[in-house]
Image (spheres, grey):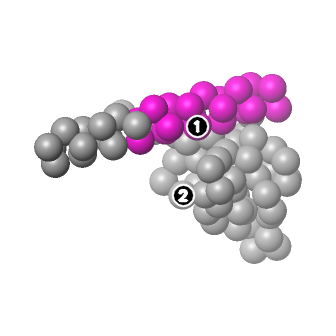
């Protein structure tokens, strides 16, 4: 199974590399040249293995990104709790 991660395009350079904000201040460079449709700053996208594989509807993209951020926050809480239990 493959995991596509939602993000929001911050900038697209002339060489086709996009800076994508995955939330929580994590911005990463990805290949935008493989996107089925051109992307621009503000677009919501799905990224897999460092390439943009889809552009999302703005409402759908915002919702996916919010859900992904919530999931990551919950996972971090669980990891911290497990770590505390292991130290005890």
Per the image, label 1 sits on a secondary structure element best described as helix
Q: Nearer the viewer, mark 2 or mark 1?
A: 1
Q: Is residue 42 above or below residue 50?
A: above
Which of the numbered marks, if any, corresponds to residue 69? 1
Q: Is residue 4 left or right of residue 16?
A: left
The residue that appears at 70% across and 26% down in the rendered structure is 63
What residue sits right under mark 2 in the picture? 50
- Considering the image in quadrants, where does the N terminus appear? top left
Residue 14 sits in quarter: bottom right
Which of the numbered marks, if any, corresponds to residue 85? none
Q: In this view, does 44 lie to the left or right of 78?
A: right
Q: Could you tell me residue 59's position as x and y percent? A: 81, 26
Using the numbered discs, state the Cα–Cα distance from disc 2 to disc 1 in whole angstroms: 19 Å
Give yes or no for residue 64 being in the magenta stretch: yes
Q: Which residue lies furthest to the bottom in this view?
A: 15
Residue bounds of the magenta highlight: 58-76
């Amino acid at each position: 199974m493959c995991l596509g991660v939602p993000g929001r395009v911050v900038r697209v350079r002339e060489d086709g590399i996009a800076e994508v904000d995955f939330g929580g201040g994590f911005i990463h460079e990805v290949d935008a040249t493989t996107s089925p449709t051109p992307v621009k700053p503000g677009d919501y996208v799905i990224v897999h293995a460092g390439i943009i594989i889809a552009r999302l509807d703005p409402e759908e993209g915002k919702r996916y990104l919010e859900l992904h951020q919530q999931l990551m926050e919950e996972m971090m809480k669980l990891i911290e709790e497990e770590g505390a239990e292991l130290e005890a």
